[in-house]
Structures are given as structure tokens and as C-alpha cells.
Image (spheres, rainbow, N blue to C red):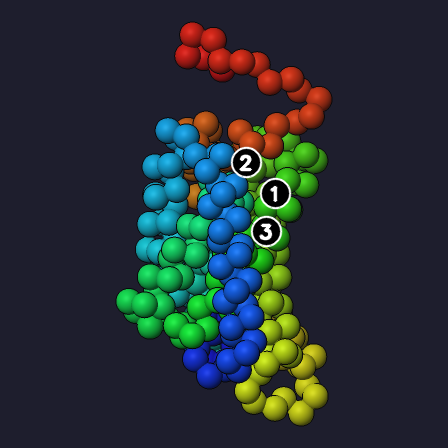
């Protein structure tokens, strides 16, 4: 079942495809640095460090998916997108993946571009698109924020897993005998269950932060309703 892991090991995808997605990952991270610098302020900078550390710590904890015969852990794309935004969030997840590959051997170093593309780029982007949509429909209450976090996390995990299926279609080293649909179904089913765990962790964390310090939740600051004008800060109160 190791070939079903989101952290792709060396040898699962061939060299040319791995090199292609390494270039994609570098380009995406460069864009993330350039765009993320616009968002960084005295609140977001330390928050980004905390988010990266939290994702790293929680990814060390696996929860079993008995029906699929695998285990899952937090990917962190939706959590990072909600707390620090899509650009800085993708960088946070990428940093975690690099440390895990280089220090703990979780995912092949040669496959790092593939893993960053799936989990840091695709996962975070899919999550933030859903967050932007749902927060324009749902009320900005703890319940609405929790539903947004849960749904975006669940969907982002499944979408990220489909990135692996696409990459395997391009350069998988084992012949599936034309059964790519079976691989897609297996990946989607397993990661749907993993996404439920991810959604619960993400919703709990985001709602807890929002209740204590709503100003630290990027999704609440960066996605203001179009019909409500922004009130400038006066005397330290927004």
C-alpha cells in the first residue's frame, strides 16, 4: 500500500516527470514568495511560523483508515490557507515537506517536486478556492467558519490525491494494465476518509483560533464581504 501514500517515494514516478514537477514546484514557490511578501505583517509573519510548526507536529500523528488498509495524517493545505492565506500557506506546507523528506525520509528527495505540487500547491489552492466561495455564502459565525474549514479540508485532500493519479498516468514506473481508473478510485476512496479526519482537525483548530483571536484568521481578514465597506483603523480599534 506504500504506492498509495501521498508522500511519493523514490522510484514510483520516472525521472523526466519528476523533473518536470520539480520545475513546477520551484515556479509555484517563487510566485508564493513574491505574492506572500505583500501579505506579511506583524501578525502574519509569526503566525506563519506557528502554522508550519503545528502542521509539522500534527503530520507526525497518523490515524488508521481501517476500511482502506492505510493510515492518514493532516496535509495542512486548508488549515494554512485559512490562517495565513494561500501564498504563505503553500510555503508553510512546502517547508514542512522539505524537512520531512530531508530529515525523516518521509517521501523521496527526488520526488520532492511531485509532493510539493500535490500537497502544497494543489491542496492549498483547492482549499482556498472553496474557502473564498463558502465564506461568501455562509455566515461568518463559528458554525459557518467550522463548516467552511471542514469542507475545504476534505475536498482539498481528495483533489491533491488526484494530482498523484495524474502524475502516475504521465510517468508511473509500474504498468497498471490500463487500470488507471481503479487507481483513481482507490486513491479517492482512501483520501475521502482521510479528508474527514483532516476536516475535523482543521475545523477544530480554526474555530478555536477564531474565538480567541479572530484577527489572526486570514480568511476573515482577507475575504471581506463585497457589500460591507472596510472601516479604517482608528485609535487602535478597527
Name the mark nearer the viewer: 3 or 2. Answer: 3
Q: Earlier in the sequence, mark 1 or mark 2?
A: 1
- Give the residue at x 46% y 73%: 111
Give SS at disc 3: helix
- Give the residue at x 33% y 72%: 105
- Give the residue at x 37% y 49%: 52
- Give the residue at x 61% y 56%: 155
Does the image show residue 66?
Answer: no
Q: Earlier in the sequence, mark 3 or mark 2?
A: 3
Q: In the picture shown, does residue 216 fall above or below 89?
A: above
Name the mark nearer the viewer: 3 or 1. Answer: 3
Q: Give the residue pinned by disc 2.
A: 219
**Depth check: 206 or 113 in front?**
113
Mark 3 → mark 2, Cα distance in angstroms: 13 Å
Q: Are marks 1 and 2 in contact (CB under 8 Å)?
A: yes
Q: Give the residue pinned by disc 1.
A: 131
| Badge 3 density bin: few <14, some 14–19, many ≥20, Cα 10 Å | many
Amino acid at each position: 500500500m506504500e504506492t498509495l501514500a501521498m508522500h511519493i517515494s523514490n522510484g514510483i514516478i520516472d525521472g523526466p516527470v519528476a523533473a518536470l514537477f520539480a520545475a513546477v514546484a520551484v515556479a509555484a514557490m517563487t510566485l508564493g514568495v513574491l505574492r506572500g511578501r505583500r501579505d506579511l505583517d506583524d501578525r502574519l509573519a509569526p503566525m506563519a511560523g506557528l502554522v508550519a510548526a503545528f502542521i509539522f507536529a500534527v503530520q507526525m500523528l497518523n490515524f488508521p483508515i481501517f476500511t482502506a488498509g492505510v493510515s492518514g495524517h493532516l496535509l495542512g493545505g486548508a488549515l494554512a490557507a485559512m490562517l495565513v492565506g494561500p501564498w504563505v500557506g503553500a510555503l508553510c506546507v512546502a517547508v514542512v515537506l522539505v524537512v520531512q523528506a530531508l530529515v525523516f525520509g518521509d517521501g523521496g528527495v527526488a520526488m520532492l517536486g511531485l509532493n510539493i505540487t500535490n500537497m502544497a500547491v494543489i491542496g492549498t489552492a483547492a482549499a482556498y478556492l472553496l474557502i473564498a466561495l463558502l465564506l461568501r455564502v455562509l455566515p461568518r459565525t463559528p458554525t459557518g467558519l467550522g463548516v467552511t474549514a471542514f469542507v475545504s479540508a476534505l475536498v482539498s485532500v481528495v483533489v491533491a490525491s488526484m494530482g498523484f493519479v495524474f502524475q502516475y498516468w504521465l510517468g508511473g514506473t509500474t504498468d497498471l494494465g490500463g487500470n488507471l481508473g481503479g487507481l483513481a478510485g482507490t486513491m479517492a476512496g482512501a483520501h475521502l476518509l482521510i479528508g474527514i479526519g483532516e476536516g475535523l482537525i482543521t475545523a477544530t483548530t480554526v474555530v478555536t483560533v477564531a474565538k480567541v483571536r479572530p484577527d489572526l484568521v486570514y480568511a476573515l481578514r482577507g475575504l471581506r464581504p463585497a457589500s460591507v465597506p472596510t472601516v479604517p483603523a482608528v485609535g487602535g480599534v478597527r
